[in-house]
Each structure stands twice: as C-alpha cells, then as structure tokens.
Image (cartoon, rainbow, N blue to C red):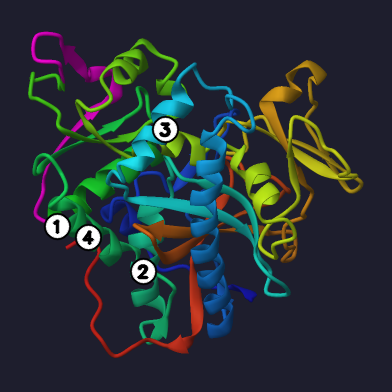
Amino acid sequence: MYRHWVKPRQDWRRTIQSQGMIFPTTPTPDGGEVPYWDESAMYEFASDEIDQLEQATADLHRMSTEAARFLMTGAMGDLGLPKGSLALASESLSTEPPTLHGRFDLVYGGDGPAKLLEYNADTPVTLLESGAIQWYWLNDKFPNTDQWNHIHEDLINQWHFLSSRLRSRTVHFAHGPDAPLEDLATSGYLRDTAAQAGLITRGLAIDEIGYDHDSGYFVDDDHYRIDVLYKLYPWSDMLWEPFGQVIRDHPDNCQWIEPVWKVVMASKALLPALWHLYPDHPNLLPAHLAEPGTLAEWVAKPLHGREGEGIVVHAKDARSGKLNSQARQHYIFQQWCPLPNFEGNHPVIGSWIVGDRPAGAGIRESDGWITDIYARFIPHVIDAPRPAEPEPDPLS
C-alpha cells in the first residue's frame, strides 16, 4: 500500500459536479473551506492486499450478523434504545427483510491484517464518490489500471434481486430534515441505481412523511401510499420519535431499507459483542461496554454516533475529548489503534458490502487521528491491469 501525489485533472471541480458531486469541499466554521474530494493524491494497492481486504470484509459481515443476534437477546442491555426495540429488531431479522448495503471502516496500512473500527450498517454515506466519482477519475487518469470497485453494478444487481421481494415497484427515498449535502447526494445516487434496475422512485424528506390513520399506511406529501421506503435517517433517532412509536405499533405496514434490525448492527455495542464472540480474531480490536477493562490505551465511542462525534481518545501519544464518568454506560471502549501515517495523512478504508457481498472501497484520510467531517476522500488504484470485460457507466 502506497500513497502517491497525482496531478489533478484540468477543471476537476466542474467535472465532478457534473457527475453529481455537489460537495467538492467542506465548509469550516470560520467561513472557509477545506477539500473533501481530493485528487491531488491516490492510494495504490497490490492485488493480494485487496484480496485480504475483501476476505476480511466478508468475514466481518458474517460475524456481525451473529453479533447482532447476540445483542438482540439483551445480553448487553438495551443499547440506549426505547423499550421493546430489541424484540422489534429480533422479529425483523427473523423475517429476512430486504437489505441493501453497509460500510465497514477499517484500519489498514499494508503491514498486517485489517482491523475493524466500526460498521456503518444503517445510514452509510460516501457511496457516490466510492461507486462512481473515483471510477470516472480512474478512467480519465489511469484507463488501463484496475480499482477495487464494482459497487455500482452490485447496487443495480441487488435492486434487481430485491425487486421480486418488494411490495411495490415504487420505492420512496427519504433523507433527514436539513440533511447535509452528502446525504442528498447519497440518496440521489441510490435513486439512480434503483431506476437503472427498473424501479420507480420518489424522493422526499423524512419529516414530509405522514400517517393515514384510516388506511393504516404511511403516505408522502402528495398522499401517495408508501409501501417501500429507503431512509437515510438513523433508526436510533427514529425509534425515539413519535414517528417511531407508530412503527413499533405497526411494524408491517411498510418495507424499510435498511430494515429495523440494522439499529442493532449499527450500534457501537456491536464491537464488544464481536470481541465477546470472537476473541483474538485478527480483524478485531478488544472492546468493552461501559468501561475500558484491562485496556491501557483506548478510544471511547458513543453507542450511536456519526462522523467521529463524541469520540474520546485516551492514549500516550494522542488525547482528545473528555469523558463524563456518569455517561460511561452510553459508550463502548475500544483498544487504541493508531491509523497509518503517510507523511501526516491518516487513511481509513471504507469497505462496502452490497447485499452480502464485498463490493469495493472508498478511502477517507485526515490530518489527525479521528476521521471526522473534515476528512478528505482520496481515490485509489490496484497495481494490476484492468480486466478485459467492459465496465458499465455508473451514471448512464
């Protein structure tokens, strides 16, 4: 694994915006901006390294499903969820509802097995840039070189697979109120993949969804019945809201993507559950619920959080944040594992699952040890020629 400096394409910003990348930079509190999409660098992998990452992703996905089943028994408490949520999740999983995707965040530097930081199993983003934007960059810059990336075609194939199990060929796509641009881009990109699979799509914000008490169904702002809903809004928030009470009372009135059982798999409690079930697994870091145990250096993570929010680092060479001792029961403690250091750049590999299959990777890097909202997305290549088979155009 290497990091190389690369000359950006001429007029790259206009190019990626025309491809749907509506947030090439990230605004800062002082009114400035920092790059989000950054093609002044790239990461290069050997083929055997990609094989290792792909196998680790497959293993972690299988293990995570078993860990979610374990958590649904209540063995590690209520996970900070409303009463009855674990039973609701268990019932959901037992019916094997449609599921689309997830993203593992992995520490990997090419010098040992990948280590799991967390699993974004409910509302993963960075999908457009992983599946499409970096593929276009590859075609422009290195057209004869390969990339670990069949995300786009896998999404279309998964929609095809799911279509026979959906209650309707119309799928609504909802994002949170005042959603950041990355959420809008992700939702729009997934709508495009569903449309390419022959489905009808409608978009709206989550707070535009209503409930028709007469029919017992959710409806959109045009009073169109919602039978299938992809929601880019976390179950861990929704179940606490009045909206979530309706779902708990009527769990079968809509097909949810991702399904409600993903609230357990998306919880950081998954990490101590995995360590409990698979101690010393090469792709896992020791992790505990509510206390660090024997860990001398650790990272405390809230049970439900995104983009590095609320993370506390307690390590010899890195300290960040402060932990309220009374809030420990709402945290997990994971062994400190410093990110690789490429001349001050610290990458995290986002390894995608589509359906049950590893599908490719996107890399975010930061200047510090925590991958937060100011992290950059860096494209990657494999040191291997591209297969002869023609690849589909992600945005055709």
Depth check, mark 2 against mark 4: the one in front is 4
Assess whether mark 4 and mark 3 are in contact (beta carbons under 8 angstroms).
no
- Which residue appears at 28% of the width and 43% of the height? 97
Q: Residue at x 20, y 15 (%)?
A: 210
How far, Cα to Cα, is label 3 from label 1? 31 Å
Q: Name the residue under label 3.
A: 89
Give the magenta range.
197-217
Q: Which mark is residue 135?
A: 2
Disc 3 residue type (three-letter): Ala
- Could you tell me residue 69's position as x and y percent? 50, 42
Q: In which quarter of the image is the C terminus?
A: bottom left
- Asked whether, in this view, residue 225 is left or right of residue 56, the answer is left
Q: Could you tell which of marks 3 and 4 lies nearer the N-terminus?
A: 3
Determine the CA span between mark 3 and mark 4: 27 Å
Q: How crowded is mark 2: few (under 14 residues within 10 Å), some or many (20 or more)?
A: many
Is 306 or 374 nearer to us in this picture?
A: 306
Gap in angstroms between the C-alphas marked 2 and 3: 36 Å
Badges 1 and 4: C-beta atoms under 8 Å apart? yes
User: Which badge, 2 or 1, comes first in the chain's sequence?
Assistant: 2
Give the residue at x 58% y 24%: 78
Residue at screen point 60% across, 28% down: 30
Coordinates of residue 363 in the picture (x, y in percent):
54, 60
